Amino acid sequence: MEQLLRSLRVIVPAILLAAAPAAAQQVTLERDSGLYAEPRLDASQVTQLKLGATGEVIGKQGAWLNLKTPGGSGWLFSFNVRFQSQQAGAGDSGAGSAAGRLFGPRRSVSVTSTIGIRGIEEEDLKQASFNADQMKLLDGYVATRQAAEQGARASGLAPASVEYMDAGK
Amino acid sequence: MRGCFRHCIAAALVAAVSGHAVAASIDLGRIFDVGRDLRTATAGIDETEEIAVGREVAGRTLGAAPLVADSELQAYVNRVGRWLASQTERPDLPWHFGVLDTSSVNAFAAPGGYVLITRGLYEMLDSEAQLAGVLGHEIGHIVQRHHVKVMQQSAAVSAGARAAQRSDRSVLVNNLIGTGAEVFARGLDKDAEFEADRIGVVLAARAGYSPYGLVEVLHKLAARTADDASLALLFKTHPAPGERLTQLGDALAPRVAALPTGTEPAIRQVDPNTPPPASAKTAPAEGASALQQQGEGGTTIPSGGGSPGKGLDAGGILRGIFGR
């Protein structure tokens, strides 16, 4: 029973979040950008948006956000916007932010990054000594190349040929 | 002579990692005596030495924060990570992946195939594609040997002090491992981070994931405020997520139409029975013996005679998605 309750504590919030209508997800443009009729750079342009313009996100597809703006709805290259800032520490681990809602949540998130719990800091790293026991554990978790490939295939992952990218303009 | 030379370089690397005062024990002068400067010398670091240095760095990081006590989770992250690493030019490094039990949001790469992600960051992720993007970024640092390039930057600083080092070698050594060299190296770091972002996107795509997992993570981070305690190290040491998004967007724009769609499998959650991370106070010191670890391939890493318990320089060899 206890286990069932524990499971429900994890599952129920996830379902509620998934089923809830997406709250307004406001974004602000970081640069002048075209709003396109399709999620493609060569699609027809609905309108041209200016730096600082805002819009409401109603969906995503790959590198594109479906945006509702006063000048019309369309698709915007997602790199050109920033999501509204989120004050952390109030029971949020990132998934509750606008970006979190858009790119998740597909699950509930246990909160560990609350203020008051001390995390790893630069000073901790400077003071740290080699931990042989933990290193032994780490060695024990290593996956062989073959095991990794089997796992990937089982998850339906198919390798693709993709060239490395140069820096942009 | 060759063996001695390599020994000196390994010592210099460890010094850069640890950042403690080991000047006296590093005979850099001997390197110059044989007619090579350190810029040339660091380019000659072989894989065995690289792995040995990385192992030391990873072991010290584990001294600052232990692994999450969830063996299934750790095995899972290793499978995902190794599959990504298999898409690179260095598929047969001894790739190790681990989730650190700390609420901080960060991830680290150490030379030779060691990648560590914090629980704070892991629990922000919504899909395996996002995990792939983060791990792919770290793998990118290792494949590109960015840590070696940091050493080369340090050598450039030291070149300016070469005259001074003839009378006082400690001047040169301090330039190599001290704050000055570290600050100087930051110029390169930014480009290295942007490059690792581009590699992270490509590796995720090659492995069959959505290429945009890392982009989504950067959006999440950009939406976090700078006064978030768990991101303190991030904002102190790294280009802002927004700047990374801009750089990545410029690089990706001509490529988006041709990139495969990929998939976004569910990510494995941390076992809910695992308690939240404790205060990340430094683990008990392993003492001087820990600084004389036997690296893979039998390479001994000299400690350089530094005091035990002092050491890991987050801004040196240790490179992360948010680390320097």
Image (cartoon, grey):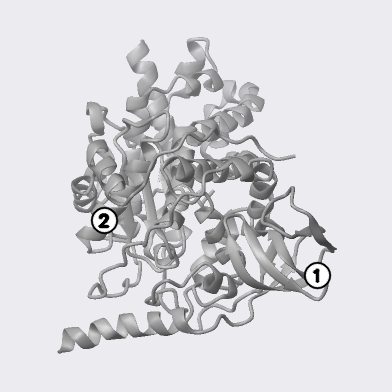
Q: Residue at x 79, y 71 (%)?
A: A72
Which quadrant would the N terminus of chain A be assigned to in this image? bottom left
Please give left or right for residue A122 compared with residue B51 in the image: right
Is B180 left, or right, of B24 in this rendering?
right
Whether residue A46 appears in this view of the structure is yes
User: What numbered label is drawn on residue A164?
Assistant: none
* Vertical order, B306 against B149 (above or below): below
For the point 25% across and 81% down, which residue is it? A7
Residue type at tag 2: Gln
Q: Determine whether, in the image, residue B224 is placed left or right of residue B100.
A: right
Q: Which residue is mark 1?
A: A53
Q: Are marks 2 and 1 on the same chain?
A: no
Q: Amino acid at mark 1?
A: Ala
Q: Chain of mark 1?
A: A
Q: Locate the C terminus of chain A by quadrant.
A: top right
**Percent coordinates x, y for residue B139 in the rendering:** 43, 41
**Quarter occupied by residue A62:** bottom right
Say which quarter of the image contains residue B296: top left
Q: Where's residue B209, x and y in %?
A: 44, 49
Q: Residue at x 59, y 64 (%)?
A: A60
The residue positioned 21% from the left and 59% from the top of the image is: B72
Secondary structure category for the residue under label 2: helix
Residue A44: % across, % down: 78, 54
Question: In this picture, is A90 found above or below B71?
Answer: below
* Residue annotated with mark 2: B74
Q: Is residue A11 above or below residue A74?
A: below
Residue B317 in sight from this viewpoint: no
Question: In this orientation, which residue lies closer to the viewer: A5 or B2?
Answer: A5
- Assess disc 2: are there few (<14), some (14-19) or many (≥20) residues with their C-alpha within 10 Å of its C-alpha: many
